[in-house]
Image (cartoon, helix red, strand yellow):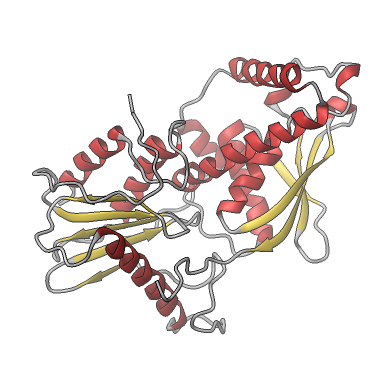
Amino acid sequence: MAPVAPRSGDAIFANVERVNAELFTLTYGAIVRQLLTDLEEVEEVNKQLDQMGYNIGIRLIDEFLAKSNVARCVDFKDTAEVIAKVGFKMFLGVTASVSNWDADGTCCSIVLEDNPLVDFVELPDTCQGLYYCNVLSGVIRGALEMVSMKTEVTWVRDMLRGDDAFELQVKLLKQVPEEYPYKDDE
Amino acid sequence: MQFFGGSEISPSPPAPTASGNNAHMMYVFNRNGVCLLYREWNRPLHTLNAQQDHKLMFGLLFSLKSLTAKMDPTNAGKGNLGVPQLPGQGCSFHSFRTNTYKLSFMESPSGIKIILVTHPRTGDLRESLKYIYNLYVDYVAKNPLYTPGTSIRCELFNTNLDQYVRSIA
């Protein structure tokens, strides 16, 4: 049987169930608002958002792999391209681009021109340290950890703080190969 | 509506049901060797207790994967047998057949391994296993009451799975 070709982000996006964008944006906004009220400290909220993203990412990876049929990525460059072109398109409906590769090929930037999470959002002066979209960095970190890559994801540019685009820096810390989990004497 | 026990131990095999006679049994493992699901439809012979059976199955597949990757004549890489593989490297085997059964295997890059044991004249089940993986995503991964890494106790998943397996030739 011929192997099924990987589907492009657009094709998958057209086939998955979608939710109203405004509902999504407003729900996310309500979550951040509630976290700010409950935790009060901006750093704590950033950490919670990252943790929430991580929990989402570890489940999201299976859906991504099942629906997109991409071949196993050969190296980290491939991985970043797939995240930007297929992943973001499939789940958020926006296409991101990859740039700023470092010499080893272990660190890159994913740039989003458009971000549905931040429609209608303005950060007040009391929340200046807040990374509003920190859930996205958690999602990427969680998803990559489930495919054996330990990464560190940080925000470089954030439109809510006055920059011109959203830029995430994804740095590969190490690849963790699968190990036999049982001890030999058991 | 799904209700969950939530204990960490591997599930003990349920009583064989009359449905799903096309397949003998099915295992789902995660990347840490935890048996997430064991379904049995038609297994007349039990030789080991459940824990040992799961460990044996996982160990067998782990070793087979390693061995098949090492023996690959088309691969220029120089892996050593026993050294764990990075994801993306090496070929992956998908089934083996004996005179009494056929075992089909699928592993996702996230480490979810699906094993289906059927009668020996079954054709290539790779598409079926992919469909089962999709069922896993829809009923288990997306289920907020399920904790990843624990055994699967989702009635909806079991029902849909039984229904699908019954329809595999």
The quadrant holding residue A135 is top right
Expressed as whole percent of the image width and height from the top left, the position of residue B94 reads: 34, 66
Side of B162 relative to A53 (left or right)? left
Q: Quadrant of the C terminus of chain A?
A: bottom left
Q: Position of residue B108 (x, y in %)?
A: 45, 55
Depth order, front residue of A61/B45: B45
Residue A103 point in image, percent of width and height: 83, 65
Q: Residue furthest front?
A: A186
Q: Position of residue A106 (x, y in %)?
A: 75, 61
Quarter location, residue B138 = top left
Q: In this image, A89 relative to B95: left or right?
A: right
B161 and A47: which is toward the camera: A47
In the rendered structure, the answer to whether residue B37 lies left or right of residue B30 reads left
Residue at 84% of width from left, 25% of height from top?
A160
Note whether residue A84 is visible: no
Query: Looking at the image, which residue is at 71% across and 21% down?
Result: A35
Placement of the N terminus of chain A among the 4 image quadrants: bottom left
Residue for point 41% across, 70% down: B62
Q: Is residue A97 above or below residue A77?
A: above
In the image: residue A142, left or right of residue B163: right
